[in-house]
Image (tube, helix red, strand yellow):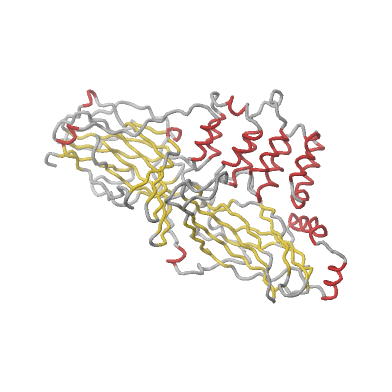
Amino acid sequence: MGNAASVKLVFDDENEANHDEHTQKVVKAGEPLMGTMIVETNKSISNARPYLFLIGKEKCREKRTLSTIFLQIQLPLAEIPNALLTPGRYEFPFLIDLPATMPRSFEFVRSPNSCKIKYYIEAQLRQGRKVRRYLFVDSAPTIPSDPVPFLGHPVTRDAALLSPRGTLSFAGYVVDTRLGRGQTMEICVAGRNDSNVEIKGIRIKMIETVIFSAHGAINRTNTTGPPAVPPASYKVTLVQFPDVPPFEGMQKKSTLGVLKARHEGFSPRREHYNAIRNELLARENVIRVKIPKYAKDTFRGQTLECRHHLEVQIVVASFGVTPLITIPLSIGNPQEPTGPQTAIAVPSAPPAPLEEIDIPVEPSAPELFEQESNNYPIAVAVQLQPMDMRGISTRTPIAVAQSNAFIIGTHAVVVNNYDDNDEEQDGDYDNASLQETLLEVMPARIPRTPTFENLLQEMVSSVQDYDIISRKLADSAWMPIFSSLTPSQYGTIILHVNVAFDQPKVAVLVATSFDKESHPFTLCEFLLEAVRNTEEWNRTVMVQKLLPLCTDLALGHNTIRNELNEWEQVVTLSSFEQAMDAR
């Protein structure tokens, strides 16, 4: 060992003698991570302060590299008496309660551009080189919650470009847009063929789009103009399913019938909206497709975004712009393994070469350990074994980090090279340099002053706004901020929710915290702002979720209805009736 202090990071399922520090450790979000920082030194080290750091980053590379920390923790492992480490061997056990909301590790490369979500854990005895171990984080299973349905506005198109051959109308419905890899989803479709064009079938594609920028945060709230440098965007067809035959009721009409309808001013919108809605909700025409296991997690961060959607389109026997439905999806790990599924359209393999589809390795998270309790006390570390006594020691972790110790979101850091100190660090510390320098510690968690502006800033820096707001609502210091929200501020919160699938859930969470007796505004005013600030495809779900909370609906229902388009009024009609009857 010479004149150096040796520092190692060993996880509990590894053997110290032959563990490979260059191999990624596979961990599961939401599960505990246990290990030990091991220090061996043959000389005394002053100002010894063993620390552990866990970092989650978004990294984007274009002509430069932008690194953004979205998750960090600093964990002091021990209080060394007089900060003096005498010669010997020291073991500092730790336990980290990983947050369940950690995004899955991710890498996307389209040379020379690339982006990634990466994690690493570092051990540091004092300022200087750190021992770093990289982690592959597998996301937690999709947690069952209220479904986020899609009931999209029917799309109507002329059936041909060169002659008045009538129109095609088409719409789709999905019970829940949150899905796990390998699961089968059902798409309900309905349409009207008011043309003399033959429909050959229905074509479905599953699209994955990766968007990232090394020149600043992606515009998340649409409150400012376009960025000076547009983000890179790569659209990949994960799979194109075989065409599905047309359903009954989609047969073409005669040319005479089409011309007569046009002459009489026939409006397919007024005629068909109620019928299409009823067919969709009755699930008369169902197509089943399977989510490929090589799909990435749906994710939206500050500088990196991964989107998924289905494109469902009518295929006709002539030229023309046929109706195209875009159905947003949120893809993650399934709650439990799915059994064999019967599907009309199930891909047997990706349609594109592997280098084009960028299929990640599918790791299986190992069983890390068994434990009886997470409530370990934090104690002072002591020297476990001198260098001449190296027996195995069994002990309880003495440094514990619960998930609420994590700092979520920081400012971006621009670096000049792509590595950004990513190279593996060895565990050797030069004793002389240690004697001359002090430990450089990451800034401690600073509680944000409860203000509306600080809430928005924290949401901008986060990847899970629902969890942030849940914690704030449980904090009495933040309750005055929520109880005094104006409708405009309420709408701004909805606008800042980075995951569109969570917007209705966040809206209900905040609305249920209001003191309805003392609040100066009506809940209908809040609902109106929520509808104005949510994603277009989510507006009907927002109305259906918030209507039951509106005690003043008799006074404000017409204002809300007037904000909705004709299709949205049709879809929410029964919800309004039920809410009015309940008052």
Seen at 82% across and 75% down, the residue is: 254
Count all numbered tags in the image, as a single digit. 0
The image position of residue 150, as x and y in percent, is 66, 52
In the rendered image, the quadrant that contains the N terminus is top left
Report whether 520 appears left or right of 118.
Answer: right
Against 3, residue 242 (above or below) is below
Q: As drawn, is 294 to the left or to the right of 65? A: right
Q: In which quarter of the image is the C terminus?
A: top right
Judge whether 42 appears above or below 569 on screen.
above
Q: Where is residue 495 in the image (x, y as percent from the top left)?
A: 60, 42
Taking 518 as reference, is 264 left or right? right
Q: Residue at x 29, y 51 (%)?
A: 22
| Residue 73 as seen in the image, left or right of residue 87 | right
Q: Quadrant of residue 434?
A: top left
Q: Locate residue 157, reporting x and y percent.
A: 72, 65
Q: Quadrant of residue 125?
A: top left
The front one of 442 and 391 is 442
The answer to which of 390 and 541 lies nearer the viewer is: 541
Residue at the image point whose x is 52% and y is 41% from the top: 464
Image: 79 above or below 148? above
Q: Where is residue 431 in the image (x, y as percent from the top left)?
A: 16, 36
Between 289 and 3, the one lying in front of the other is 3
